[in-house]
Image: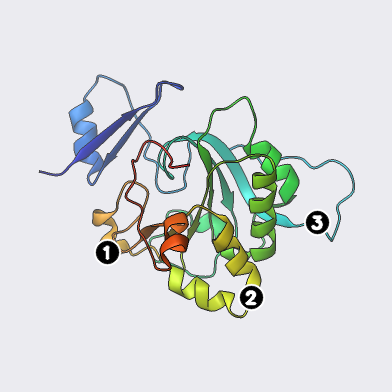
């Protein structure tokens, strides 16, 4: 029997249903809750536009090109997350849910400081921030700027998605130290390309069975890759 996961958000009142067959899940719901909307990886129902920046742009300010951001995510890392969708990706994974984010010229360039302020809006509760794409690591300077801006503002847990494997990112870091600095400053990495043929084996926060959820804090202590084995609902701080 295929598994159906129901997540009721007590803060927003929203119901999230995760199943290998959405047709089967919809049939189980029947007419109890009315029509639903299918949401794939990194496809929020409500996407807030890139924050407006005040003052003149500075070429020396770390910035990220993004499509938008959102709060109250329960499916992109442990606990409740504020998430941002970074644009630009050249990996071209077949069947990717977010192909609209692939063009490198898509989205809006936003200074990292301003984006961090928007993601940490005190009107919303959160256990951490998730950075998705697109491919965030294809904008390494802006990504590091955002990570540091979030940390300076007290963000307790930063998670980043990447279509590159952890090993590939570490090899890249040998040529571009910024990549290594990012990996050394965040708590969690969800990595690996999306493989459409393996989508049925996806985990709670991944899109396909090959992708790994890596606990970077534990990995740094151990000197080897340690997968996350903590609770789904909350962060280890």
Percent of width and height locating residue 198: 27, 62
Q: Is residue 46 visible?
A: no
In the displayed structure, does residue 64 sit left or right of residue 9? right
Q: Earlier in the sequence, mark 1 or mark 3?
A: 3
Q: Earlier in the sequence, mark 2 or mark 3?
A: 3
Give the number of the mark in front: 2 or 1.
2
Write down the quadrant of residue 232 in the picture. Answer: top left
Residue located 56% across and 49% down the image = 85
Q: Circle 2 is placed at which residue position?
A: 176
Write down the quadrant of residue 17 in the picture. Answer: top left
Residue located 57% across and 27% down the image = 124
Label 3 crowding class (10 Å Cα cut-off): few <14, some 14-19, many 20+?
A: some
Q: Circle 3 is placed at which residue position?
A: 61
Residue at the extreme right of the image, as rendered: 56
Q: Circle 1 is placed at which residue position?
A: 197
Percent of width and height locating residue 154: 64, 39
Residue at the extreme front of the image, as rendered: 221
Label 2: element kind: loop
Q: Does 85 appear above or below 169?
A: above
Q: Is residue 206 visible?
A: yes
In the displayed structure, does residue 147 sit left or right of residue 79? right
Q: Earlier in the sequence, mark 2 or mark 1?
A: 2
Label 3: element kind: loop
């Amino acid at each position: 029997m295929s598994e159906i996961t129901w997540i009721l958000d007590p803060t927003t009142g929203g119901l999230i249903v995760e199943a290998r067959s959405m047709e089967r899940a919809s049939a189980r719901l029947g007419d109890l809750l009315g029509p639903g909307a299918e949401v794939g990886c990194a496809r929020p129902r409500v996407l807030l536009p890139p924050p407006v920046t005040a003052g003149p742009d500075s070429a020396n300010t770390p910035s990220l090109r993004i499509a938008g951001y959102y709060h109250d995510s329960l499916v992109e890392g442990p606990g409740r997350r504020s998430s941002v969708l970074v644009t630009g990706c050249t990996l071209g994974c077949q069947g990717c849910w977010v192909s609209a984010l692939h063009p490198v010229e898509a989205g809006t360039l936003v200074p990292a400081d301003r984006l961090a302020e928007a993601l940490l809006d005190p009107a919303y509760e959160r256990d951490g921030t998730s950075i998705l794409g697109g491919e965030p690591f294809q904008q390494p300077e802006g990504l590091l700027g955002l990570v540091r801006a979030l940390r300076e503002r007290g963000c307790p847990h930063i998670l980043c998605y990447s279509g590159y494997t952890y090993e590939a990112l570490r090899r890249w870091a040998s040529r571009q130290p910024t990549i290594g600095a990012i990996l050394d400053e965040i708590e969690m990495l969800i990595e690996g390309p999306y493989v459409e043929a393996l989508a049925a084996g996806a985990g709670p926060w991944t899109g396909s069975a090959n992708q790994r959820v890596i606990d970077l804090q534990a990995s740094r202590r151990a000197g080897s890759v340690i997968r996350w084995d903590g609770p789904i609902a909350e962060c280890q701080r």
